[in-house]
Amino acid sequence: MGQKPTSCFCQQALPSAQECGALVEGLTLDGRPLAPPQFHSVDWFEGQEFTQHDDPDRTQEPFLPPSFVQHKDPQKQRDKTWSEELPIPVENSFARVVHGLLDDDDCAVLIDCINRKGFTPALINVGHGRQKLQPYARDGHRVIADNVELSAWILQVLEPYLPGQLWGGKLVELNERLRFLCYTPGQEFKMHYDGNFSRPRGHPREGDCSRITVQIYLHDVPPSHGGATTFNLGKQGGLLPCQPKAGSALLFSQDLEHGGSVLLRGLKYTLRTEAMYGHMDD
């Protein structure tokens, strides 16, 4: 799989426990210090490709939903939310921030859940079910977990803020493939368009596709630390940043170019999924 290693992501390349602790110095969540990241050791190399059979993201490992999914009423949580529109000068496109999707204690529980699994380097999809390690384009870390209970709970809270219909399709669900991202200083995700995810042949919802990205921020990132989600609106609007705030969700149509701006200090945890749309006659 791939050519001779040019850059290895082995145990020696991972931050030590002391270094991880230094990353979260001065950052708090739910009245407590922000939990430092836990990394899962791998021996990958730059340019290495993986197939679905390789399962580099360990999606087959069990992932229990966080406790708030069982005891918190999503309808009551929805009552605590409010939204703000971002100025997007692109016809039929939008970006909005929903505040209050998660409470601070929910965010803390989620971070604990994903740290138990451990972060690995974030890969890039290269088509035909294959992924590639390309740290020059994307050099953060992530955990992937499939969980219908958590994605369904989030949808119940967010549903009023998602278009019921978009580009000829009807909202049906959120993608249960949840990607938890972790960025450390110097890391970024360069400008890109989110790929359109389609349900594969044989899936009960075969043919459904993603049209809106859902990016959930799990703690505050001070503006001085960088790490904003930044839209490139070209000559019409220039660069438009959205700074992470604990428990808020950034929703945007997948035709918008954007990037994860370089993190200058501290840490950045987020959760990303997509709103899925099906045929109008379903």
Image (cartoon, rainbow, N blue to C red):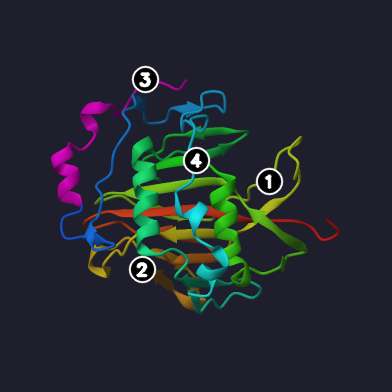
Report if residue 245 is visible in the image.
yes
| SS for callout 1 | loop
Q: Which residue is mark 4?
A: 145
Q: Earlier in the sequence, mark 4 or mark 2?
A: 4
Q: How would you rate the neighbour count of disc 2 (Cα within 10 Å): few for under 14, some for 14-19, many for 20 or more? A: some
* Residue 248 screen position, x and y as percent: 43, 67
| SS for callout 3 | loop
Q: How would you rate the neighbour count of disc 4 (Cα within 10 Å): few for under 14, some for 14-19, many for 20 or more? A: many
Q: Which residue is mark 2?
A: 243
Give the distance between the C-alpha atoms of the residues marked 2 and 1, in whole angstroms: 29 Å
Q: Earlier in the sequence, mark 3 or mark 2?
A: 3
Q: How would you rate the neighbour count of disc 3 (Cα within 10 Å): few for under 14, some for 14-19, many for 20 or more? A: few
Between marks 1 and 3 in the image, the one whose residue lies nearer the viewer: 1
| SS for callout 4 | strand
Query: What residue span does the magenta drawing correspond to?
Result: 1-23
Between marks 3 and 4 in the image, the one whose residue lies nearer the viewer: 4
Q: Amino acid at mark 1?
A: Ser
Look at the picture and state if 206 lies above or below 61.
below
Q: Locate residue 15: give its quadrant.
A: top left
- Whether residue 233 appears in magenta in the rendering, the answer is no
Q: Residue at x 34, y 46 (%)?
A: 112
Q: Which residue is mark 1?
A: 198
Q: Is residue 203 left or right of residue 226?
A: right
Q: Which residue is mark 3?
A: 4
Disc 3 + disc 2, Cβ < 8 Å? no
